[in-house]
Amino acid sequence: MFNVFIVEDEQTIVDVLTAYFEKEGWSVNSATNGSDGLHLIKILNPDFIILDLMLPDISGEEICREIRKESNVPIIMLTAKTAEEDRIQGIEIGADDYILKPFSPRELIVRMKAILRRIDRFDNSSELTFNNRDLIIKEKENEIIVNGKYIELTQLEFKLLTEMAKSPGIVFSRSNLLKLIQSDGFYEGYERSIDVHIKNIRKKMEVNTKQPQYIQTVFGVGYRFGGKPDAALVTF
C-alpha cells in the first residue's frame, strides 16, 4: 500500500490530512516532532513525506537535509513562512514542492499526485548515456550515474536534467524550464527557482561547478545540456 508520512506538530492538521489520505486508499503514519519523525521515517521508508517546517524540536529544514542524505523520496513542505527566500531555501535543501498554510487538503493531494505522475512517467522510458558512458541516466529506475557513482537527485532535479539531456545543445530559457516542472500543474515555481535547481544539480554531478560539463549557462538566455550522446535512446 502507498504510504504517506506526516511530520506536523498541529494534531488537527494531522487528523484532517490522515482522513483525506485514507480516503485515497493510502496508508498514513505521523509524528508531531522532528526527532520521532526522523526515527520513524528511517524505519518505515515511506513513499511520500509531508513535512512541517516549524516543529518544536528540530526544524523541518534540518529534517529535510537529513532525509536527502539517504533518500530522494518526494517531500512537500508545509509552512506559514511567506517570504521568497524561505521558499528558495526549501528548494535548495531538496523539497519537491512547498505549500503555504492555511491550505486546502484537496489541493495538497492534487500536488502530490502531480509529483507521482512525474515519477511514473519514467517507468516505461529509456536509458540515456553520454561521454562514453561517463553519465548514465536510467529513467526506468530513476537513477543517475556519474563516473560510476550513483547520484541522488530530487524528482524535480531529475526531471529538469532528463528533459534537457533529451535535447543536448538546445538552449532552454528559465521560462521554458519552469514550464517543464509545471507541466503537471500546481507547482508554484518562479524563474529564480530554476537557478536554485540548476545549482543543486551541478553540486551533485559536476566535477567542477565553475566549468560545468553537463549543465552549461548561456548568459542572458538560460541553460543547455553539454554532454555528447553515445547513441540513440535504448528503450526497454
Image (cartoon, rainbow, N blue to C red):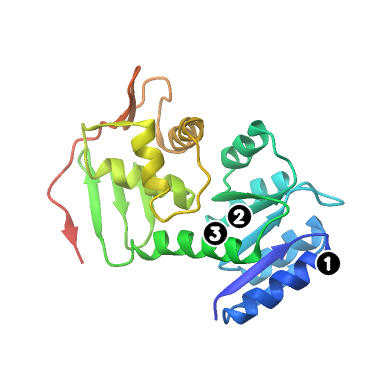
Q: Which residue is drawn at 67% across and 67% down?
A: 5
CB-based contact (under 8 Å), mark 2 and mark 1: no
Task: Check disc 2 and give the amino acid type.
Answer: Ile
Residue identified by numbered label 3:
73
Residue identified by numbered label 1:
11
User: SS at mark 3?
Assistant: loop
User: SS at mark 1?
Assistant: helix
Q: Position of residue 95 (x, y in %)?
A: 58, 48
Mark 3 and mark 1 lie on one chain; the one further toward the N terminus is 1
Residue identified by numbered label 2:
76
Task: Check disc 1 and give the amino acid type.
Answer: Gln
The quadrant the N terminus occupies is: bottom right
Q: How far apart are marks 3 and 1 (CA)?
A: 23 Å
Quarter of the view holding residue 217:
top left
Q: Can residue 150 be seen in this view?
A: no
Quarter of the view holding residue 37:
bottom right
Q: In this view, does 38 lie above or below 225?
A: below
Q: Where is residue 45 in the image (x, y as percent from the top left)?
A: 61, 68
Instruction: Looking at the picture, tell me which residue is in the foreground, 198 or 111.
Output: 111
Q: Residues within 10 Å of mark 1 (few under 14, many from 20)?
A: few
Q: Which of marks 3 and 1 is in front?
A: 1
